């Protein structure tokens, strides 16, 4: 690869843009051509997702689409964003562990505590081994720099919460995939604007977009023979990668005094990261609050998620996913516009808007019933 980069440099071709283009094309094509084989094997071996209490589908659907996503990201990131694996030694190992746990859960349904142990191990590898952690809260609740041990614990918990929160929004066609594309695009644009030191993260974001776009072609398919879900394999993998990119984003604005690395400052960086990931955060908080109020275990499955509420309004999966993504893009726009105000105030505004979006479908449903 380095010889290829040298050839491009001598030819006057920008290496970064070649990586962007090839990374997107190959990640898309690898996923696109892998999924039909996975669907065929899943149907032949009856490796299907059975309709359950949280399900929004009524028939068996193959649920190993996450394998194709991992396959694509694993290959393309290793080739076009290999610098990431030099900088973050345990990143690829973490992805492999998540692949194994996800596939096991999609096939035989693992116990929750086993998944949690695996997520703790994966998060610890990245946080401690690769030193990707939240070092400061930038003044949220009056807290700035975090003690090393507190920073480690807080970062591991953040990874685990985001992995599981993203898993929870994967309930209807197109939502988890579409939302991960939007998040990756927003982080990718941000990294691009923050300078060439962050270009490997831009390439990773583009690779994720390419892989998930190809997956959505099948996930949103009207033909039963092509349809597939990403399963826990895909949702945990994407949740982990989005947690990784969001923590890296916050970390950029920490003054670490590294040589040859430009310094940036954005006091509201954590609030902006929360805005980009607001859907899984608010959806998870909302269902936990509802379950506690109803004196039920926070881990019980139900249909109180935002996407379930929209389906209750007789919307299709596609329209529900579209409306949810558009609303939360609005929140990101608000966060970006007010990014220079006090970080605590911005965080409150973001969370209020997030919860308004969570309860808006309930309000519309009651209003419609009262009118009838």
Image (cartoon, grey):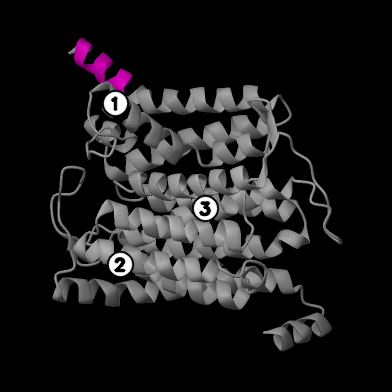
Residue at x 80%, y 83% (from the top left corner): 11
The first of marks 1 and 3 along the sequence is: 3
> Is 318 displayed left or right of 344 in the figure?
left
In space, the residues marked 3 and 2 are separated at their CA atoms by 19 Å
Q: Look at the image and tell me whether residue 63 can be seen.
A: no
Cβ–Cβ under 8 Å for marks 3 and 2? no
In space, the residues marked 1 and 2 are separated at their CA atoms by 31 Å
Q: Secondary structure at mark 3?
A: helix
Q: What residue did someone put label 2 on?
A: 103
Give the vertical position of 279 relative to 249 (above or below): above
Q: Check if residue 57 falls in the magenta segment.
A: no
Could you classify mark 1 by the number of other residues whose Cα lies within 10 Å: few (under 14), some (14-19), or many (20 or more)?
few
> Is 16 displayed left or right of 169 in the figure?
right
* 248 or 336, nearer to the observer: 248
Q: What residue did someone put label 3 on?
A: 242
Q: Secondary structure at mark 2?
A: helix
**For residue 292, which numbered disc appears in the image?**
1
For the N terminus, the quadrant is: bottom right
Q: Check if residue 367 falls in the magenta segment.
A: yes
Bounds of the magenta segment: 362-370
Could you classify mark 3 by the number of other residues whose Cα lies within 10 Å: few (under 14), some (14-19), or many (20 or more)?
many
The first of marks 3 and 2 along the sequence is: 2
Could you classify mark 2 by the number of other residues whose Cα lies within 10 Å: few (under 14), some (14-19), or many (20 or more)?
many
Foreground mark, 1 or 3, reads 1
Q: Secondary structure at mark 1?
A: helix
Give the vertical position of 115 relative to 147 (above or below): below
Residue at x 61%, y 70% (from the top left corner): 89
**Based on the displayed image, in which of its 4 quarters is residue 218 positioned?**
bottom left
Residue at x 22%, y 75% (from the top left corner): 40
Residue 320 is situated, as x and y percent measured from the top left of the image, at: 33, 39
In space, the residues marked 1 and 3 are separated at their CA atoms by 28 Å
């Amino acid at each position: 690869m380095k010889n290829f980069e040298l050839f491009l440099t001598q030819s006057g071709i920008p290496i970064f843009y070649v990586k962007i283009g090839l990374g997107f094309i190959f990640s898309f094509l690898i996923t696109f051509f892998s999924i039909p084989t996975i669907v065929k094997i899943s149907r032949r071996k009856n490796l299907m997702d059975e309709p359950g209490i949280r399900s929004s589908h009524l028939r068996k659907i193959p649920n190993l689409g996450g394998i194709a996503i991992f396959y694509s990201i694993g290959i393309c990131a290793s080739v076009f964003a290999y610098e990431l694996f030099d900088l973050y030694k345990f990143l690829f190992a973490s992805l492999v562990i998540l692949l194994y746990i996800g596939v096991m859960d999609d096939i035989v349904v693992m116990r929750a505590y086993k998944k949690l142990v695996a997520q703790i191990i994966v998060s610890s590898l990245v946080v401690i081994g690769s030193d990707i952690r939240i070092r400061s809260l930038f003044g949220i609740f009056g807290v700035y720099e975090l003690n090393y041990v507190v920073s480690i614990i807080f970062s591991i918990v953040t990874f685990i919460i985001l992995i599981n929160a993203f898993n929870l929004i994967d309930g209807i066609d197109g939502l988890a995939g579409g939302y991960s594309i939007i998040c990756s695009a927003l982080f990718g644009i941000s990294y691009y604007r923050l300078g060439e030191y962050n270009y490997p993260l831009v390439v990773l974001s583009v690779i994720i977009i390419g892989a998930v776009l190809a997956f959505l072609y099948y996930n949103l398919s009207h033909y039963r023979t092509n349809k597939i879900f990403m399963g826990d394999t895909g949702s945990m993998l994407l949740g982990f990668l989005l947690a990784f990119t969001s923590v890296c984003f916050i970390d950029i604005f920490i003054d670490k005094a590294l040589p040859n690395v430009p310094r940036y400052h954005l006091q509201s960086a954590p609030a902006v990261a929360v805005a980009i990931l607001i859907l899984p955060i608010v959806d998870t908080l909302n269902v936990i609050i509802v379950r506690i109020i109803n004196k039920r275990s926070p881990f019980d499955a139900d249909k109180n998620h935002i996407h379930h509420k929209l389906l209750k309004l007789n919307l299709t999966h596609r329209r529900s996913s579209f409306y949810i993504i558009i609303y939360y893009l609005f929140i990101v726009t608000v966060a970006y516009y007010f990014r220079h105000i006090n970080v605590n105030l911005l965080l409150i505004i973001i969370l209020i808007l997030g919860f308004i979006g969570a309860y808006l479908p309930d309000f519309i449903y009651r209003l419609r019933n009262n009118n009838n």
